[in-house]
Image (cartoon, grey):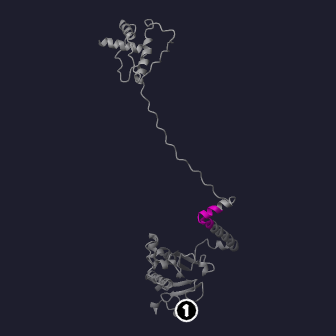
Amino acid sequence: MRLFARTLLSAVLAAGLSLPSGAAPLARPIDPSSPLATQAASTVMQVRPAPVPASGGAERSHAQSSAAPAAAVAPHTAAPAQASAPTPAPREPVLLKPTAIPPRAKPRPAPVRPARPVASRHTHEAGAHADAAHGSELAQVRAAVSALLSANVRITETRGPAYYGRLVPRQTPRATVVTCADSRVQTNGFHADPTNDLFVVRNIGNQLATAEGSVEYGVRHLHTPLLLFIGHSVCGAVTAAAGDTARLEPAIQRELATIDIPRGIDVTDGVLLNVNNQVESAILKFSGEVEAGRLAILGAYYDFRNDLGQGAGRLVITNLNGETDPARIRSRLAAGDLLRYGFMR
């Protein structure tokens, strides 16, 4: 019986049918011309497909696909075909192949936005619209850069190459000047040409503590005999230090924390007190230079609001080597007595 099953399956394969999914292949092929193969083929021809219900589409399709190749096994034993029904062409054998997994579709890249065109001098209207939309920052930058470059051209043409040639060998300042970073405080307000004459250090509140290295470089490496701290009218740093700094950024809070003034103090009094504190700290730090008579440490008030009544824009000396009495300061300035300190009396 097992041999007959093998012979029948071999005959089916020889007739062009394919193995159903999951069927095991034959252990060894059987010659189709053998008597067993001929008997199996005749048996296949005598099998009639069972009627297929109308609703079974899959079973009907399988029966039709099985009947067509079976008729092609032994045409000499099949009944002649009716004239009215044409004989269908034999179907090609279906080979068993591993099912190929379709490749995953590549994700579609995100659309690339086109670059925004750069405004040029030929797109004045578009540039004006952009300036309005961005709060005129671009207009301010353009104006600032233009002013800087234009002024530089005028200054260099006026001074000439020889002026700049004298700056090449080294710097030779006579004073280290610590001013507030406020944009209203510029050296051209109290010096006609500070180039190579003032070693300028700027920070909020004109402090020693937040720029100690720069100040020390000016005093001990450039050997400037004058150290000058300059405060000014309506100083924003002093106003902030005398108020609530909790909402300010941490870095700003750290710099304001070294301005030692009382809460709520008047801004002018706060500026004068802060200048005195800076002079006192510098005297302690540079005590060796002070005692040797090599360094004068002064404090000043740049008064563009005329708070001290000596004229708007005046630079008023308010501390001379620790001396804060206005009358004594005027007297010593007039006498040129600038390297003597109060503890030296």
Q: Is residue 137 magenta?
A: yes
Give the residue furthest to the left. Answer: 1
Q: Main secondary structure of the magenta part?
A: helix
Q: Is residue 54 visible?
A: yes
Quadrant occupied by the N terminus: top left
Image spot of residue 281 (x, y percent): 45, 81
| Position above or below: 118 against 213 | above
The residue nearer to you, when weighing 311 against 243, is 243
Query: Residue 152: percent from the left, percent from the top?
Result: 66, 70
Nearest the viewer among 249 and 330 is 249
Could you tell me which secondary element the residue under label 1 belongs to? helix
Q: Where residue 212 sits in the image (x, y, percent)? A: 47, 75
Residue under the point 44% across and 7% down: 79
Q: Residue under circle 1?
A: 330
Q: Which picture quadrant has residue 232?
A: bottom right
Which of the 4 image quadrants contains residue 121?
Answer: bottom right
Q: Nearer the viewer, residue 70 or 140?
A: 70
Q: Which residues are magenta?
A: 128-141
